[in-house]
Image (tube, rainbow, N blue to C red):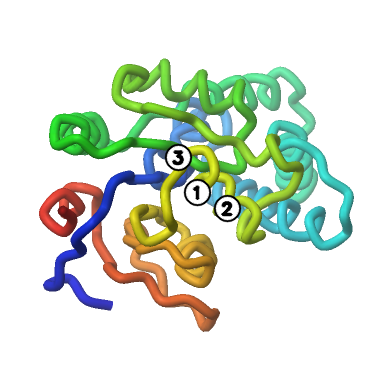
Amino acid sequence: MSQNNKIDGIKACVFDAYGTLFDHHSAIGKHRKQLGDAADQISLLWRTKQLEYTWLRSLMKHHADFWQVTQDALDFAFDMHQITNLDLKNDLMNAYLSLECYPEVPDVLFLLKTRGFKLAILSNGTHEMLDSAVKKSGISDLIDITLSVEQIGTFKPDPSVYQLAVDQLNLHSHEIIFQSSNAWDASGASAFGFNVAWINRFGQSKERLPGKPNFELKTLMELPDLIH
């Protein structure tokens, strides 16, 4: 994965939401004191099961929206850690509506916007979840369009999800660069035909999957210098 080459002809930057723009672990962070020493384990398990359930539901053809999936994953994590505090569960779910964005996000989006790129979010999240997070982070004026998989009823990395961005932006796939912190999502978007920047915030190993991201970056700050 190159960090030196640049890509010409980009007209739109499309961003995954959770882990890319918004810190999904910040939900647990707001209630770390109540969870104690198990907080990090619970946060990781919650996220892991959340993703697993999206993939499994897609394969089973039994779709439920991301709010339900997120709730089911939290139920699983609480069961594993023998937590029965319903008020805490509700607080954690509500925290998902006000996740913090990563520090560089507003400045990067502003720079890209001033350079004339269309900016979009393409996420598993529901419109309600995404609209709430965007508003909380103060980036509403920077995002041109927010796209949810609920418009088609399946989850990433189904190619139809990435096609949604092509259709809604009215662009060719090679005119779009897609950003995700999830290695599997970056692979899926690349296999579909997008230019891809994998924002490897967490030092993940590369996936052994079809599709190779064009760039591997540590944060979004590096993105503006790589596209024209």
What kind of element bears circle 3?
helix
- The reply to whether the C-beta atoms of the residues labelled 3 and 1 are less than 8 Å apart is yes
Residue of label 3: 169
| Location of residue 169 by image quarter | top left
Residue of label 1: 166
Please tell me which residue lies in front, 173 or 102. 173
Within 10 Å of the Cα at label 2, are there few (<14), some (14-19), or many (20+) other Cα atoms?
some
**x then y, percent, for residue 121:** 45, 37
> How far, Cα to Cα, is label 2 from label 3?
10 Å
In this rendering, the answer to whether 156 lies above or below 91 is below
Looking at the image, which residue is at 79% across and 44% down?
79
Please tell me which residue lies in front, 76 or 199. 199
Residue of label 2: 163
Looking at the image, which residue is at 32% across and 22% down?
139
In this rendering, the answer to whether 19 lies above or below 60 is above
| Location of residue 8 by image quarter | bottom left
Q: Quadrant of the N terminus?
A: bottom left
> How far, Cα to Cα, is label 1 from label 2?
5 Å
Disc tally is: 3
What kind of element bears circle 1?
helix
| Location of residue 59 by image quarter | bottom right
Label 2 sits on what residue type?
Answer: Gln
**x then y, percent, for residue 109:** 24, 34
> How far, Cα to Cα, is label 3 from label 1?
5 Å
